[in-house]
Amino acid sequence: MATPPGSELFPHIRIVLGMVVGLAVSKLLTGFAGLVQHPGRYRLSAIHLLWAVSILIELVLFWWWEFALSQLQVWNFTTFVFLIVYAIALYLLAALLFPEDIDEYGGYESYLIQRRYWFFGLLAATFVLDVVDTMIKGNAHWTRLVTDYVIQVPFGLALCTIACCTVRPRVQLAVVLAHIAYQAYWVTRILASAVA
């Protein structure tokens, strides 16, 4: 069976990506709503809330950047599977932030600290997946962003390593604030390019 042109495949692929990203956003928004609905059920944590906001931003950025795939003319099943795996990794980050029950942990901060290897391991994987994703989008896209990736990937992997190696709340708070600051840089760049 012949593969349809990229222009015909992309809308279908975007729908599947949208479903996974939509589930992740839904998981986060449901978690935020649960915190408002039951404020006294669990101890709130600035670290946890900031990571939830950061992953929400990450999902929005992912959705925005994936539009560049509309320019891709040649698709194959491997590329499709890769993109689904990337989206699933982002979903799992959202799901890890708002589990069904955290009674045994006593609060979100304690839960996140105890599950830090899973969370930051997945987050580290997304930095690597993002590089491959950018390369898939073509040489022109890669060339435009390669300088940023020389900074972003080592920076992101270093943050994940630090967060895995410590349980100190101040260090964990510094890591999430650094990650959000870098995301703010990307949002500013996107807004600047939209205005230009």
Image (cartoon, grey):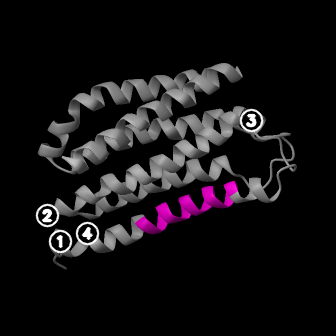
Marking on residue 10 = 4
Q: Tell me if I can see residue 167 in this picture.
A: no
**Separation (CA) of disc 2 from disc 3:** 45 Å
What kind of residue is marked 3? Glu
From the top left corner, tell me how far across and down residue 127 is, in percent.
40, 37
Please give the name of the residue rendered at 34% of the width and 67% of the height, measured from the top-left corner: 14
Check disc 1 and report its element: helix, strand or loop: helix
Q: Which residue is mark 3?
A: 109
Q: Is residue 60 above or below residue 20?
A: above
Kindly check if marks 1 and 3 are in contact, taking CB atoms under 8 A apart as contact: no
Q: Tell me if I can see residue 185 in this picture.
A: yes
What kind of residue is marked 2? Gln
Kindly check if marks 1 and 4 are in contact, taking CB atoms under 8 A apart as contact: yes
Q: For this view, does 1 lie left or right of residue 53?
A: left
Q: Which residue is mark 2?
A: 73
Check disc 3 and report its element: helix, strand or loop: helix
Q: Which residue is mark 1?
A: 7
**Earlier sequence position, callout 1 versus callout 3:** 1
Check disc 2 and report its element: helix, strand or loop: loop
**Separation (CA) of disc 1 from disc 3:** 45 Å
Badge 4: how crowded within 10 Å, few (<14), some, or many (20+)? many
